[in-house]
Image (cartoon, helix red, strand yellow):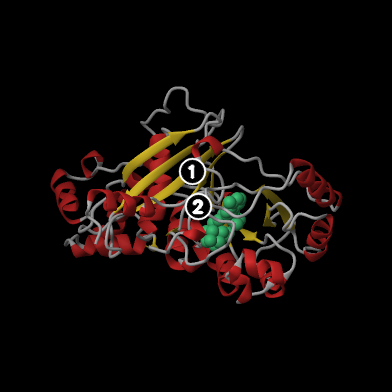
Amino acid sequence: MSEDKPPLIGLSREELADAMASIGIPEKQRRMRASQLWHWLYVRGVSDFSLMTNIAKDLRAKLAEAFSIARPEIVSELISVDGTRKWLFRFPARGAGRPVEVETVYIPEEGRGTLCVSSQVGCTLTCTFCHTGTQRMVRNLTSEEILAQVLMARDRLGDFPDTSTPQGAIVPSEGRMVTNIVMMGMGEPLYNFENVKKALLIASDGDGLSLSKRRITLSTSGVVPEIARTGDEIGCMLAISLHAVRDDLRDVLVPINKKWPIRELLDACRAYPGLSNAKRITFEYVMLKGVNDSNQDALDLVRLLKGIPAKINLIPFNPWPGSEYECSDWDRIEEFADIVNRAGYASPIRTPRGRDIFAACGQLKSASERMRKKDRDTGTAA
Ligand code: SAH
Ligand code: SF4
C-alpha cells in the first residue's frame, strides 16, 4: 500500500471513472476502463497493474504511476489448531502519525468460511469486557483498508482464480473459502459509517467480490441514529451487542448505553428496514460470571426481545490479560441457554475459536501499544 499514491481499491464505480478522468482517459472510455479495473481488482484479485492483460502496456504504466492497488504488509499470520487464522496487517499512517496495525480473523467451518473484519484502529468506546476497548482510538480505517482485509484473506487462502489454497489449510469442503463477512473485529463500524458502507457495497457487488448481503453482518454496540441507515443504505444483516437486560448494568458493560438506553435501542431494532422472520437481528450476549448470567437475566432477555425477529448468540467471555471478568461456568451457560432455547431460539452458544492464537471475539487489539513499547525499547519514542 502506498502513502502517497491514491488507491483505486475502495472507490465506487463513479469514483473509479473520475480517477480515469484525472489521468486524461477520454470520456467515452472511462466507464469501460472502470469496469475492466473492477473485474481485475475484485474478480481476479490482482494487485499489480502489469497483470491486467487486456489493458495496453502504456496505459498500465500510466495507471501504475498515478495509483496504488498494492496490498498491505503482513506483519504476522497465525494459524490455530482448529484452522482459525489471524493476520496482523500494517497500513500506512494516513495522518495517524505512524503506520497502524489491524487484526483480521478467518474462521473456517464445514459449509462456510467467516472473515471477522475490523473497522477502526482501536475504539472510542470503552466496553469493560472488551480488549479493544482498553486501547485508545487511533483512527478510522478507509474503505480501501476495510476491503484490503477481505482481499488479503482471499489471497492467503487461495480464494481467487489462478491462486491455490495452501496445503493442509482447513477450509470449507467446497465452494468459496470466504463466504461470510462479520464486522466484528476492532472498532465500532457505525462510528465509521461512510467507509464501512462503501466497503460493504463493493464487497456485495455482483460483478466483483459478490458476497450476498445476507452473508454480511454488521455488529454494533448500539449507535441508534445509524441503525436505520444501515438497513436502508447497506442492506446487510445486523447484530447488536446487547450483553445486559437492565440499563444500570448495561451502562457499565456497554457505556454507550448511557447515550442510547435499551429501550431506544430495541425500538430502532424493531424498525430495522427489511426485518422479517427470514432476516432476523442477532443479539449478542457475552456470558460474564456472576454479572449477567442468572436465570432471571435469561428470562428477562427473552421477554425483552419478544416480538422482534431475533437470533440470540451467547458468547462465552474470552478473557484477556488484565480483564476484570471471568467466563460463566459451563453449567451456568447451558442452563441460561436452555431457558433461551425453550423460548424458541435454537442452539445459541457460540463455540470459541482460535483461542490458542488469541483470535477469539473481543481479544483483538492492534499492535499500537506493543509498538509503543518497541519504540521505547529502541529509544525512538516521541
Ligand atoms: N464494536 C462492535 C463490533 C466489534 S466487537 C460491537 O461492539 O458490536 C464484536 C463482538 O465481540 C461484540 O458483541 C462484543 O461485545 C464482543 N466481545 C468483545 N469483547 C469480548 C470478550 N472479551 N469476550 C467475548 N466477546 C467479546
Ligand atoms: Fe468497541 Fe465493540 Fe469493544 Fe465496545 S465491544 S469497546 S464497541 S469494539
SS for tag 2? loop
| 325 up-or-down from 250: above or below | above
| 379 up-or-down from 223: above or below | above
Residue at 30 percent across and 46 percent down: it is 71
Q: Are marks 2 and 1 in contact (CB under 8 Å)?
A: yes
Q: Residue 257, how many percent across, how many down?
A: 63, 71
Q: CA distance from mark 2 to mark 1?
A: 8 Å
The amino acid type of the residue labelled 1 equals: Val
In this rendering, position of residue 323 left or right of residue 266: left
Q: Is residue 159 visible?
A: no
Q: Residue 237, how many percent across, how many down?
A: 61, 57
**Where, quadrant-wise, is the C terminus in this rendering?**
bottom left
Q: Say few, some or many: other residues with alpha carbon within 10 Å of mark 1 (under 14 / 14 to 19 / 20 or more).
A: many
Which residue matches tag 1?
A: 105
In this rendering, position of residue 219 left or right of residue 247: left
Name of the residue lying farthest toward the left: 58
Q: Residue 102, how many percent across, how many down?
A: 40, 51
The circle on residue 185 is 2
For ligand 2, the image quadrant comes to bottom right
Q: Of marks 2 and 1, which one's residue comes earlier in the chain?
A: 1
Which of the 4 quarters of the picture holds residue 236?
Answer: bottom right
In this rendering, position of residue 55 left or right of residue 140: left
The amino acid type of the residue labelled 2 equals: Gly
- Toward the viewer: 236 or 79? 79
Residue at 59 percent across and 35 percent down: it is 109
Number of marks: 2
Label 2 beta carbon within 8 A of ligand 1: yes
